Image (cartoon, grey):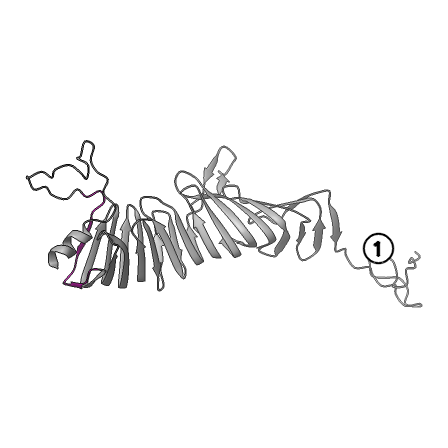
Amino acid sequence: MIEYLVMAFFAGQPVKPAAGAPDAGARPSTQSRAPQLSAPVEISSKLVSGSRSQANFTGNVVVKHRTMDLRCDEMIAHYNGPREVTRVECVGNVRAVDGERTAQGERADFDVPAGVLVVTGNPEARDAKTRLRGSQVRLTLGTRNYEVENAVVTADAAPLAQRRKGGGRESPAPSTPAEISARRVSGTPSQAVFTGDVVVKHRTMDLRCDKMIASYNSAGEVTRSDCVGNVRAVDGVRTAKGERAEFNVPTGVLVLTGNPEARDPTTHLRGTRVRMTLGNENFEVENAVITVETAPLREQQRKGEGKGNPGSAPGNTKSGGTKQP
């Protein structure tokens, strides 16, 4: 039985016959050969017990397979008919390393043929530029792709360009991380797709929408975000809304379209396109309709009170009449 367990765990994937290998009807060679393993799985632990369908590992479990190093307290490995490991279930202090990515949680399910690791139980995942948290983290071996349910993502954002004093060329400001939450996020090295109750917090802005695509540069920094559906933005005392928005991270410029509106304490703007810059109180609106607060009219002095205060200008009365000199 011990020999069977060892062989089963080292046959992680179907083995393709080598070129020139004899067919099934050929006479077997009298010389003993070691098994040819296309994708071996190496597992170590303090104790192992098993049957023909599964094995139980307990105590300092370490799994090494392809590019991944997986560790946990307890593990159950499942076999198929040809005695190959097809699935691994880990419990307790799960830690996974795959290249420059790491993941941790309380439980993990590893689909060996698909190379997919699903971590649950307060899971987290990290790479050089991004931290992911949620209810479920899904990683694929040998790639930088990921999927997170009920996600909170902290990602490096491209620094905001700023001009040097006295003019001249623009120089980058220190990078500020962006925190993004959504019901689900899936990503690749070049972009991430957030869906469901998306909330972006970056510098002075709170941006919300139904779906967002975040684009990364070669350094893994977020450079642009495209939002769709019920877009709402708050930046200081200013608010804006529309159906679509494009946010240029290095310039700090947010452009809203799809019946956009913008407000501050004294102004309401509508048009076909609203443009606002983070940390700047100004708006730009195309085909604009603006409702703006005006200074209040001075009340007409009561009859018989004589002239008004020095320096006061004539104005309209409450009834709409004009004050006479």
Residue 282 spot, x, y in % from top left: 63, 47
The residue segment tinted magenta is 37-52
Which type of secondary structure does the marked residue at label 1 adopt? loop
From the viewer's perspective, is 319 left or right of 123? right
Q: Is residue 200 magenta?
A: no
Q: Is residue 116 above or below residue 320?
A: above
Q: Is residue 41 magenta?
A: yes
**In what quadrant of the picture does the C terminus appear?**
bottom right
**Three-letter code, disc 1:** Ala
State which quadrant residue 285 falls in.
top right
State which quadrant residue 302 falls in.
bottom right
Q: Residue at x 59, y 47 (%)?
A: 245
Residue under numbered circle 1: 313
Residue 47 spot, x, y in % from top left: 14, 64
Residue 147 spot, x, y in % from top left: 41, 52
From the viewer's perspective, is 176 left or right of 126? right
State which quadrant residue 295 falls in.
bottom right
